[in-house]
Each structure stands twice: as structure tokens, then as C-alpha cells.
Amino acid sequence: MKNYLKLVNFEFNRLAKLFAVLLGITFLAQIGGVIVLSKKYLNVANERIYEDMIPKAQFIAEFGQMNFLQVARSAFFMGPIALCIAGVAFYIFLIWYRDWFGKNTFIYRLLMLPTTRLNIFYAKLTNILLLTFGFVAFQIIFLPIETTVFKWMMPSEFRNDMNVIEILQSMPELSIIFPNSFLEFILYYGAGLMVVSVLFTAILLERSFKWKGIFAGIIYSLVAVAVLISPVLLHEFVLNGFFYPIELFLLEIVMGLIIIAGSIWMSAFLLKKKITV
Amino acid sequence: MNVNFNTRDPVYLQIIRYFKEQIANGELAPGEEIPSRRELANRLKINPNTAQRAYKEMEEQNLIHTERNHPSKITTDEKVLGKVREELLVEAVDTFVTSVRSINIPVEELLNLVRTKYTKSDNKED
Amino acid sequence: MIEVKEISKNYGRKKILKGVSFTANKGEITCLIGINGVGKTTILNAIMALTPINQGQILMNGEPINEQSFEKITFIPDAITMLPSMKIEDALGFMNDFYACWNQERATELLAFFKLNKEERISSLSKGNTAKVNLLLGLALDVDYVLMDEPFSGIDIFSREEIANVFTSHLIENRGVIITTHEISDIEHLIDKVVLLDDGKVTKEFNAEEAREDEGKSVVDVMREVYRR
């Protein structure tokens, strides 16, 4: 346990820079988006009101007030989120492969630590979760800052204020990242954990068997998908709608847990018996 | 301390020979402390186990003495010391005789030559 | 004692090790000799469970090697096992964090012995100094067995001499050392045991001093005989 925590801490220090850079980009782009889009709205408003001499009230009625969602749906806001998601996806692979590549072969050191090798797996998995939660947490911190900047930029008659919760609830496309309930949180992030553990296992298969391992990794991933959807397939095609929705739901959760457990078992086996530096 | 080891003779024998030479030419005085096995290995860049073996052998030949927890010392036993000198001398002369014998030279002539050469080189060194 | 018993290793269809057996004792320096590509590094990797073997068995003091063994046996590969971004002291800190057998006193002594500056980053070290830090990381562990892969290759002569000094110092005392090399002449007088490898097999295992004593042969003489066949 102590070694696991030390490894988590060590791995986190290694990704801190990437984390900070992505957060910085996110913050700057989103604040930039608030400023640029507010300015754009105000420019249009000024043009219409002072040059075309349209009364303010008529402009607002025609154009509508600006609310934060217009920022949140723009590339300024979604772009960095997509970048962070891509960053996490990329890091799932990088977190393993960087230990093998380069002339400093850190994997030797990791595999020679006097601790169970599964701790390496857990520590890396934990770091992917930390990275993800870190982005989400900081995004939630950024939002009120951004809405405050928005308020500074926009005279109150032109804007329609929303708080953070209203903003998130109005954006179903973000509900996977910012779940609306605790159950959803567990489900979405549980599913994420499952995907990452399957990918880790596939990576370890590749690291153990090289070219053949890539195929084994793909096959392992396909098997995981098959296991996951097997209750649904049974339900639809074999048992003619046998399960209640809640039963199907619970079965899916069990399947997800089986996949996570299977991936951990497989990874432990590979790290102990098959891995090669 | 500098020894040029050859690669074919056992290293421990080469070490013993080195010590004998040092004793014979007076570099090492009777009763003088000698380096520890570890130090010797380090100075001569040899395996510590080999140094250990050399010391053990020298102890058996009574060339050195080791009391518990003390550095080893060169023996003060005159008889042993005398033997070292004699042994080295006999060995050197044996080698010399073997190589000279092939030339087939009368012994008187050889001895005269040895006498002049030996004193001459002595004077040169002075 | 480290016992390597009949180990075989294939890379794809290529058989790199074909039943290699030898033993290495505590308190002795055992040297694996063979041309490059004969599988010397693979043997060391296999001992440390860093690569799987197809057949055979490796024992330390009669037991198979597992994670717990890494407090008793360590391996110094030919590349440094720390991150380039680390300072030397970070690397030492890492070792101290994870190994109960880490000996900080000895690490400090080795830093002085090799004249290394612990503030320096690994990425900025010369080749020779990188090798020394790498060696330090292994030697400051209070382990019974140390494996070293080509500790002398690819570095300047002065670094080589300094590293050779380690072998005759108290830093090695009473440990079992296995080193690999393809160049014996530097260390001929340092080693106890020689294991000659050729074509995936051990062609001869002998004590260097005994070969000199019993047969009047240098290690190189024996190698010539074995490899000429």
C-alpha cells in the first residue's frame, strides 16, 4: 500500500507538467472565448444601436440577450475540453510507453522494485483517473470565474445570467463529463475505468508479445466488448426481452466488474510472467 | 607498489613472489606491517579473494604473521628470512644456468665473465 | 548462490539460449563472456524476471526469484535506469523511498568516490558519469548479489579505471557479482570465475586462478582453445 501511494505520487509528478499546460490552455482559451464573444456581441449591438439607430429594447428583442451558453457552445470552450480528453487518451498510452523508450530505460527500475508489479499498474491507472478528475474539478472551478468575467464584460441589460449548475444542465453533451447525479458519476467513471483497464491490458499484451501482442490486444478488447454487450444481445435476440430494464442494468454492471477484474488479473499475470524490457 | 602481472601464472603466486623480492632486497623490513588484504587487492587491482589466498599461503610459509584483529606483519624469524633470500638467489641462478648452458662455455670462463660484469654493473649503479 | 539451470529462450523462431546452466557464488566475481549477441544480457534480464524464459529455472539461495528478492539481488543494466529529468539526488531519493536495503551512507561515499555532483541532472551527465551514477544506484543497495551488464563498455579509460577500482574495494566485498563482457583483458585479474558462452550454450565454466595454476593458461588462452573449436 505504501509503495502504491509512493508510485502514485511519483507518476503524478511526471505528468504534472502536461497537466498544468493543458489546464493553462483551457483557462486561457475559455477566458479568451468569453472576452472575444462578448466583444463581438457588443460590437454588433453598438453598430445597430449607435449607427443604425435601432432602440436598445428593439435590438435585444431582435437579437436576444447573450448568455454564457453561447460561449460554452463555442470552440473556445469546447476546443480545450476536447484537447484535454485527447490528452487523457494519449496519456493512457504514453504513461506506459515512455518507460520503455529513450536511452534511459526506466522500466528496468520499475520492474525491479521490491514491490508487487501490480502496484505499477494500479498507480498508472490511478493517475489516469487523477488526471481526468483534475480536469473536471478545475473546469468546475473555472466556470464561476468565467461567468464573473462575462458579467464584467457585458452590461446587465444585454445578458441573461446563469449559474454553473444551470449551465451544465443546459448542456447534455457535457453530462458524461459532469454527471448530474452520483449514480451517473459512478456509472460513467466506472465505465471509463473499465475502458482504461482494458486498454492497459492491451498495451501490456503488446509489450509482452510485440507484434503478436498487438493482435492479442485487439482480440482482448473485442472479447471485452462482447462480454459487455452479451446481456443485451441475449436479451434482444435469444431471450426475447426476458429481463426487466433494472435487471439488464444490473447485469451490465456485473459484466463491467468482470471485465475490470479480468483485466487486472490478466495484467498481473503479464507483468509477473510475460513482460519483457 | 606496482606489479606487472603476467596472465599465465597464478596471481597469488605472483603476489608471494613480489613480497619475497621486497623482503630480500630490504624494502620490507622484518616485523614491518603490510597492507590488509583489501588494501592490497585495491592497490594491485586484483581480486580480493586472490589477495586472501596469497596471504594465507604466506602465513603457511611463515613469511607473515597475523594476530587476531591486527594487521599482518613480516616475520622476524631469521631462518625464514634467510631462506627467502636463498630461494630467490637459487632460482635466479638456476634460470641463468639453464640459459647459459646452451652456449656450452667452460665454467671458469663463465665465472670470470660473471665477476667482471657483476662488479661493473655494481660500479655503474654507484 | 545463484543457480541458472538449463534455461532456454527463443525470440520468435530464433533460439537465443539453448539450455544455459551455471552457478555464481556469493563472495565471487563471475564473468559471462561471449561475443555480442550471444545472449549475455538476456541471461541477466532473465535472472531478474525482466524477460520470460521458455524453459529452465533460476534460483537464488534455492528459491525462485520474485519481487521480494529485489532486496537481495540487483541489476545494473548498460543504460541508466532513472529519468533524464531527475537530478542525481532525486534518483537517490527514489531509491531510498522504495528499497529497504538502500544504504544512504554508502551512496554518499560513492558520490565522493566517483566525484559526482548530486545537483547535476542525469540528462546533462557525460557518458562516463552516467555509467558511474548507474553503478552507484546498484552498489548503494545492501544486496547479496549484483548483476552488471558490460560495466566497462563505451566509456573513457579514466572512468573505466575508476569503475575497476570498485571491484577491488570494500564496495564489492562479500557480495556475489555477475558481470558480462566481451572484452576480458581489462579485468582478467579481477574475476574469480569465467563462464564462456557460445551459440546459446555454456562452452566452459572455470575458475581463472585454477586455470593459471593447474594448466598455466591465462583466461584468454582458454578462450582461444574453446572458441577455435
Image: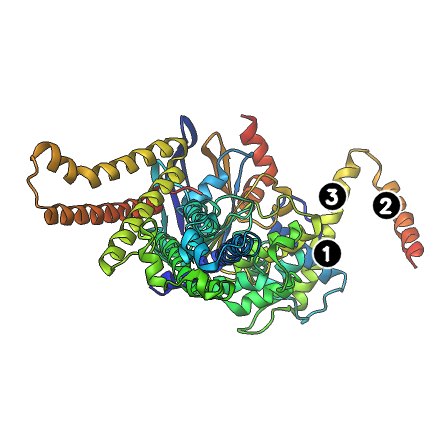
Position of B119 with respect to B5 (left or right) is: right
Occupied quadrant, residue C163: bottom right
**Residue pictured at 87% horizontal, 46% vertical:** B114
- Does C98 sit above or below residue A18? below
Residue toward you, A201 or A50: A50
Q: Chain of mark 1?
A: B
- Front-lying residue, A225 or A272: A225
Q: Which residue is mark 3?
A: B95
Q: Secondary structure at mark 1?
A: loop
Q: Amino acid at mark 1?
A: Asn
State the image coordinates of residue A32 (x, y, percent, origin top left).
53, 56
Residue C100 picture quarter = bottom left
- Foreground: C130 or B120? C130
Amino acid tagged 3 = Thr
Asked if one can make out residue A114 in the rendered structure from this viewpoint, the answer is no
Q: CA distance from mark 1 to mark 2?
A: 34 Å
Instruction: Inspect this view and state whether residue B52 appears.
Output: yes
- Name the mark nearer the viewer: 3 or 2: 3
Q: Amino acid at mark 2?
A: Leu
As drawn, A10 above or below A104? below
Percent position of residue A187, x then y:
24, 53
Badge 3 density bin: few <14, some 14–19, many ≥20, Cα 10 Å: few
Instruction: Give the colouring mode of the picture.
Output: rainbow
Query: Could you confirm whether marks 3 and 1 are on the same chain?
Result: yes
Q: Residues within 10 Å of mark 2 (few under 14, many from 20)?
A: few
